[in-house]
Amino acid sequence: MSFKIIVDSCCDARSLPVENIPLIHVPLRINIDGKSYTDDGTLNTVWLIAAMRGSKAQPTTSCPSPLEYAEAMSGDDDCFVITLSANLSGSYQSAVAGTELKTGSGRVHVFNSCSASAGEARLAFELADMIGRGLSFDEIVTQGEAYLHSMRTYFVLDSLDYLIKAGRIGKFSGQLATFMQIRPIMGEDGSGNILPLGKVRGISNALARTVDHVHSQELKMEAAGREKKPLCISHCNCPERALEVKKLILEKCPGITEIQILPTGGLSTFYAFDGGIVVAY
């Protein structure tokens, strides 16, 4: 039995740690000042950040079409599809529609990751591990769905510029927060809804508070008897900061011994923006 894993381009994983399992990216698009850019892995994120900052209108994104998903799904291999949260994008609905258009005998299951960025990558790695251990299609579906609903994703933003431009916070409030060096800490509720977890002054305090949340998640998973898993950190143009977060987690969370660090792709950069950190566990 052969498998392939299909992800949308908000997934920051570019390859899988298990050999002979294809990882296929179906790109979203980023729209800036009337031009559409395909997030196919070639977008320079430094350029993207500058273009978003200088845009006259609010940048937007558009999800892949059902046909694009169908083309990736088609064939006789069984497919697992991972999309970013259905509450953030139409990518999940498009992938589900694509299952009706595919050709070939391969079975398909679409996972709404209820996450993005590092969260999608963590789920992709988890599914690859299940395939490598010889689990069946149905076992992977059942265990994969259980895993993604137990996983949590945390975000720390260094810059509020794009949130101001996107109208997510008022311009005056955002500029005041920037002046006061206030950093928002956000997470999700396991169903793909973004929740504010707090705000502190200074990026170092924000990172330390995020590690506290990771430690709480570690204790919950330990109490639930969940097998220890690796943790993923995605960073937007700040590898040194990602290494600092890794160091803090290893010091405070003894049950977490493996951490994967990934640079953000185009879509993750769109959400996390310059200096952003995303942690999934």
Image (cartoon, rainbow, N blue to C red):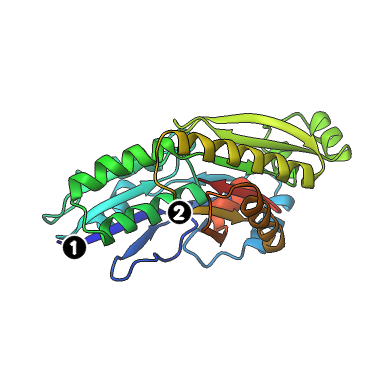
Total number of numbered labels? 2
Who is closer to the viewer here, 275 or 147? Answer: 147
| SS of the residue under disc 2 | helix
User: Disc 1 vs disc 2: Cβ atoms closer than 8 Å?
Assistant: no
Mark number for residue 2?
A: 1
Query: Quarter of the image holding residue 261?
Result: bottom right
Question: Which residue appears farthest toward the bottom when viewing the image?
Answer: 19
Q: Looking at the image, which residue is at 11% across and 55% down?
A: 105
| SS of the residue under disc 1 | loop
Q: Looking at the image, can residue 52 be seen?
A: yes
Q: Is residue 139 left or right of residue 84?
A: left
Q: Looking at the image, can residue 58 be seen?
A: no
Mark 1 Cα shell of 10 Å, populated few (<14), some (14-19), many (≥20): few
The image shows residue 210, relative to residue 259, as above or below, that is above
Residue 233 spot, x, y in % from top left: 57, 54
* Amino acid identity at mark 1: Ser
Reading the image, the residue beneath label 2 is 121
* Amino acid identity at mark 2: Ala
Query: Quarter of the image holding residue 17?
Result: bottom left
Chain-order first, disc 1 or disc 2: 1
Q: Looking at the image, which residue is at 44% across and 48% down?
A: 228
